[in-house]
Amino acid sequence: MAGFAEKVNIKHPVDPNHIDIQKDPFHPAAYILTLPLDSEPSYVWHTLFMQELWSSLDFWDRKVVLTGKTMRLVTTANHVAEKLRWLEGVVIGTNKRVDEYNKGLRAESARKLTLLDEETIRKDISSWQVSRVRV
């Protein structure tokens, strides 16, 4: 398992005048909106994001692509604010998955430490037994 994952968020405040908006070259009715992220997503965050994205029921007329510290929303011009709220919800859901992932890593790490401690104690008991038998 990889190390702990960091949360990633859309960088706020989002200035509408500085958002890159391009026409999608493949879909004549679609646009590409480039949103800034507060940090570059790790492989773990990206994987959890894709799981959250594909589990969303509202994934009909849009596509999301992560590249570096940007998130590109490909969509039609209809109801963009609603789609951005949806996308923010996907990011929040992903960060909840990150919390669960990290919690699982901490539990696994604690379990391994407990097993190591137990093994050390058993070796010490065995060593004590051996030295006790010799006396």
Image (spheres, rainbow, N blue to C red):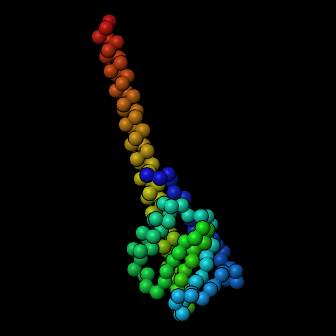
- The image quadrant of residue 11 is bottom right
Outermost residue, left direction?
133
Q: Residue at x 34, y 26 (%)?
A: 122
Side of 127 where 19 appears, left or right: right
Which residue is nearer to you in this view: 74 or 14?
74
Residue 16, percent from left and from top: 67, 83
- Residue at 63% x, 85% y is 21
Residue 132 appears at what percent x and percent y? 32, 11
Residue placed at 47% from the left, 68% from the top? 49
Tell me the quarter of the picture where residue 120 sits.
top left
Which residue is outermost to the front? 26
**Percent position of residue 106, x then y:** 45, 48
Residue 76 in view: no
**Closer-to-camera residue (82/54):** 54
Whether residue 107 is situated above or below residue 88 in the rendered picture: above
Total marks shown come to 0
- Image vertical order of residue 119 relative to residue 77, above or below: above
Coordinates of residue 7 in the picture (x, y in percent): 54, 62
Which quarter of the rendering shows the C terminus?
top left
Q: Can residue 110 be seen?
A: yes
Q: Residue at x 61, y 78 (%)?
A: 34
Image height of 126 relative to 5, above or below:
above
* Nearest to the observer: residue 66 or residue 106: 66
Q: Is residue 113 above or below residue 16?
A: above
